[in-house]
Amino acid sequence: MSQEVENIQPSYPLFRNDEYKESLANKREAYEERHPQEKIDEVFQWTTTKEYQEVNFNREALTVNPAKACQPLGAVLCALGFEKTMPYVHGSQGCVAYFRTYFNRHFKEPVACVSDSMTEDAAVFGGQKNMMAGLENAKALYKPDIIAVSTTCMAEVIGDDLNAFINNAKKAGHVEQDFPTPYAHTPSFVGSHTTGWDNMFEGMLRYFTLNHMDDKKVGSNGKINLVPGFETYLGNFRVMHRMMKEMGVDYTLMSDPSEVLDTPADGTFRMYAGGTTQAEVKDSPNAIDTLLLQPWQLEKTKKFVQNIWHQPATAINIPMGLEWTDEFLMKISELTGKPIPASLELERGRLVDMMTDSHTWMHGKKFSLYGDADFVMGMTKFLLEMGAEPADVLCNHANKRWAKAMDKMLKDSPYGQKTVVHTGKDLWHFRSLVFTNKPDFMIGNSYGKFIQRDTFYKGEEFEVPLIRIGFPIFDRHHLHRMTTLGYEGAIYMLTTLVNAVLEQLDKETKGMGTTDYNYDLIR
């Protein structure tokens, strides 16, 4: 089964060659103890029914693809957004390998992150020795200016105390007393990747500002702090920079990994690139206000800003779509006294023009979607603005207050009257919903492709196409550079959504002489 030098093939179509098909068939016959295909098809058909959905929604002891990741993954992303910061995970090496490969596959970039490699002995006796050696080695080998420490399940289950371990490592001389080592406890068995981002960010603020508030005064530096939250569209960082600069606003974008996760191929390796500086973090309590761009995932940060910095952390919605971008820019203008420039008004006008052009194709289309709380809320809001009809909206790790806010937003729109919001549910629940309440399209991350394939397996007329917007996107390239925030983000989302509608229309009307009669070139 060797490859031919003149005809090297990837796994597809290589595995469709006769010798591979024969080998796989033999393996199935000899080792898999597989049920007959008729039984598999029978069970499959049952899992697409309303009867099965009721059974599915009543399960309690099993989660199938939860549509979320774990806390330390979010903590790593947060740490990457600060200048010359090395994310350090107190736990097993395998966990860090998972975090790095997860981000590698999404960003198509190398991701720096270290572990102190806890193993069985550390699980019994604690990981302090690992911490001491790990901090010393990480600083010596990678020469960061900050080491940001988070934890995995192993360290949390045995109760390792990061504050004590880090202080003991410093007292023993493994790193200098004044070397910056912010930390956060991020147990994987509670919360999600967004919780971990929030915990790590609050840990950064606590380390650099909590004991240095005596000379701080709200508004004295004339800046606005913008906190992105767990954000994986690099264009969203860039659009924030652009809009603030066009408005002439002095600002700090706090945790900005857009450079280190998008370095050029010019022959120079950059372990560190860009990011929020220590000086900016230390100065941030002097800002006019701190705006949380994804407020539903930043509860701990909000409390810190309000209680320690004494800033209002003025409530805003995620600036997605038309209305919420308007509200965001008007709030910036109100806080800073800076007018919204003509350039952004022109950009808004172009978005409105696009919405006018496309609304006839979007109107009445049904979309089911899943993802993180703020993203899902912002996307739902934009669908309503376009006259589309959200069918089922799922966020595994959202709370009851979020669900209540979603229900209110939906009931206030004529297009949201039939929408059902689901919290605490996973993608296997979502699969049932796609079969029993068939939408025209799904919106979500790459994992939805398997639901699309299941709908197609039932029959072409049951297929529900997936529109890939969210995190992670593993099976498409360069979408992580796109934008979902601001008018620019709405333009990208609208372009993606309406062209998916038109592509599906082409697919349904490509029969020569049978369905290709509806002015195919005039859309």
Image (cartoon, rainbow, N blue to C red):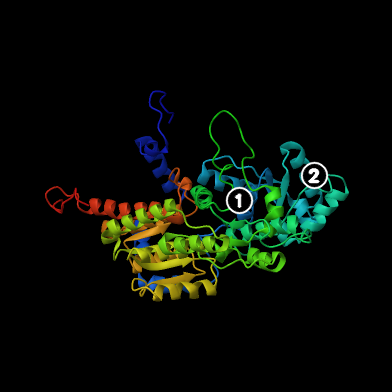
Seen at 44% across and 43% down, the residue is 477
Residue 440 in picture, x, y percent from top left: 31, 61
125 left or right of 37 in image: right
Foreground residue among 377 and 1 = 377
Q: Which of labels 1 and 2 is toward the front?
A: 1
Disc 1 residue crowd, few under 14, some 14–19, many 20+, Cα 10 Å: many
Residue 478 in picture, x, y percent from top left: 45, 43
Seen at 57% across and 28% down, the residue is 267
Residue type, numbered disc 1: Leu
Disc 2 residue crowd, few under 14, some 14–19, many 20+, Cα 10 Å: some
Secondary-structure class at tag 1: helix
Q: Is residue 104 above or below residue 363?
A: above
Q: Mark yes or no: residue 48 visible.
A: no
Which labelled disc corresponds to residue 17?
A: none
Residue 57 in picture, x, y percent from top left: 46, 72
- The tag earlier along the polypeptide, 1 or 2, is 1
Disc 1 + disc 2, Cβ < 8 Å: no
Foreground residue among 122 and 411 = 411
Residue type, numbered disc 2: Ala
Residue topped by disc 2: 133
267 left or right of 512 in image: right
Residue 120 in picture, x, y percent from top left: 74, 52
Q: Mark yes or no: residue 507 visible.
A: yes
Q: How far apart are marks 1 and 2 (CA)?
A: 24 Å
Which labelled disc corresponds to residue 77?
A: 1
Secondary-structure class at tag 2: helix
